[in-house]
Amino acid sequence: MFQTQKTNIKRIKKILIPNRGEISLRIQRTCRELGILSVAVFSEPDRQALHVRYADEAYPLPGSSSQETYLNQDLLFKIIHQCGADAVHPGYGFLSENGEFAQRCKEEGILFIGPPPEAIYRMGLKTRSRELMKKAGVPIIPGTGVLNSEQEAIEAAEKIGYPILIKASAGGGGKGMRMVDDPSRLLPSYEACKKEGLSSFGNPDVYMEKYLSKPRHIEIQILADSYGNITHLFERECSLQRRHQKIIEETPSPFIDESLRADMVNAAIKAASVCGYVNAGTIEFLVDEFRNFYFLEMNTRLQVEHAITEMLTGLDLVEKQIRIAEGEPLDIKNVSPRGSVVECRIYAEDPMNEFLPSPGLVKSLTLPSGPGIRNDSGIYQGFTIPMEYDPLISKLVTWGEDREKAVNRMIRALQEYHLLGIRSNIQFLLKILKHPGFISGDYDTHFIPTHLSELLEPEPWEVKMESVALATAAILKMMKSENAIPGQQIKQSDQNTPKIPGWKLYGRIYREGSIIK
């Protein structure tokens, strides 16, 4: 039963967003619709970024590393007070799950648009949240608390049984995690996780879990207000992952039925209740092949993939976050899922070169459009993607009346998405969407590693394109060194340079002389 009385409402006038890229821009757009001023901050590499141009105000953060810019709390609070912001929305990443930052906002009279610091502390460490869930009766994967020695790790692995997973207690995003299927690899993996936990999260503590062989990664979106009301906004299927990072999400999940959905929703609401949660959050579960589900972690923030829930429900989750922070009770009633939604994360990376980041100048950009398409992006033609930060450049989302329609629309949208100047994973995503395993919905978190070689197999047109590009580059190099007059423009001719025929790429015809690298 939802509380309807509105008391202690404090309207927000100006929000500072200590973040960058598409999520900063996403929050700014809701602020503009609500008549709230938005304040951006930016490092030196982000000086020309879109989130800086769109904001009502923007303040520089001298430097380029995350520690001296977007994680610099002293500098951020100086800007907050200087610009007169009365609230902070952290987005995701950076300070979004930092209990110290949320506590400092509280002490300095700034509304933190997220959960109370106590909830962040309770759920921030994986070992602590596991114990809390266990006491609340939420199923957890068999495992340990913090491992204090190598001997303790050896004994725990023997008791649980191989394969096992060693995880950083403060970890996230696939960092500080190692699967071990042989005792000889246990201690090196144990030490590697401790080092990565310390370097990435400032905490060397690790713990151990039983490794599930064919798990699905399914999460429940919840909203909770300050009056004890908690509701859910259905599930998101997040099993398509590369190195433990999600790259394709969809909702509803093609795997779970109504009975399992109801059980997972009840467990998610119980988890949010027991930790005193307020605002938007996500309870993540692993589901085994027998449809047993286990608590994995809670993300005490807005998720990267929140857009698919918005497309499914028609709700603006950022607006809900702001209204909850202002003191309004939840007013969501009778929300029903509509159709099916798919999201693809587009990265500036080279799948053919170990997925290494591909920063650089965006020389040309053509974005998809049409019914049921949403593109959350922070780049534009002429923008230089910096090498200092995560290579995520766009979240492409498609809606359809059913899953088949949503997937076909995503294939069409990816075929229209055209980038020049950098490498991207667009073709890699297309191959996943066209794979029989994905089409049938029969996949788990090991899908990409299992099928990696075939997903990286180049299409015939890709081989032809690469050959044409290499041949033309060689000819131009020869002409420049042997025949070209300094300062003279090199022109194509039938005698010196072969005509490049048009070829079909992304469903379009690229004409003579157009070389896509």
Image (spheres, rainbow, N blue to C red):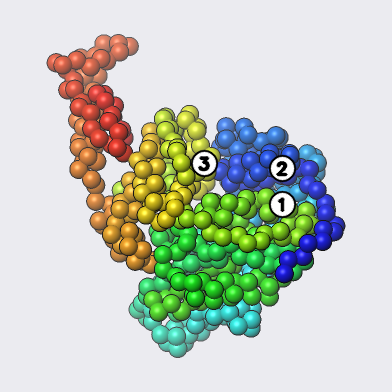
Tell me where residue 266 appears, x and y as whole percent.
Answer: 59, 75
* Residue underneath mark 3: 377
Q: Secondary structure at mark 2?
A: helix
Give the CA distance from mark 3 to mark 1: 22 Å
Q: Earlier in the sequence, mark 2 or mark 3?
A: 2
- Name the residue type under label 1: Ile
- Name the residue type under label 2: Leu
- Residue at the location (60% across, 83% down)? 137
Q: Secondary structure at mark 3?
A: strand
Q: Earlier in the sequence, mark 1 or mark 2?
A: 2
Residue 280 quadrant: bottom right
Tags 1 and 2 in contact by the CB under 8 Å rule? yes
Is residue 129 toward the left or the right of residue 192 in the image? right
Tell me where residue 15 appears, x and y as whole percent.
Answer: 73, 44
- Residue at the location (68% across, 73% down)? 273
Give the CA distance from mark 1 to mark 2: 10 Å
- Name the residue type under label 3: Ser
Which label belongs to residue 322?
Answer: 1
Tags 2 and 3 in contact by the CB under 8 Å rule? no
* Residue underneath mark 2: 34
- Residue at the location (25% across, 19% down)? 480
Is residue 324 toward the left or the right of residue 445 in the image? right
Crowding near the residue tagged with mark 3, few <14, some 14–19, many ≥20 C-alpha atoms within 10 Å: some
Depth order, front residue of 411/457: 411
Q: Quadrant of the C terminus?
A: top left
Tell me where residue 505 appears, x and y as whole percent.
Answer: 28, 36
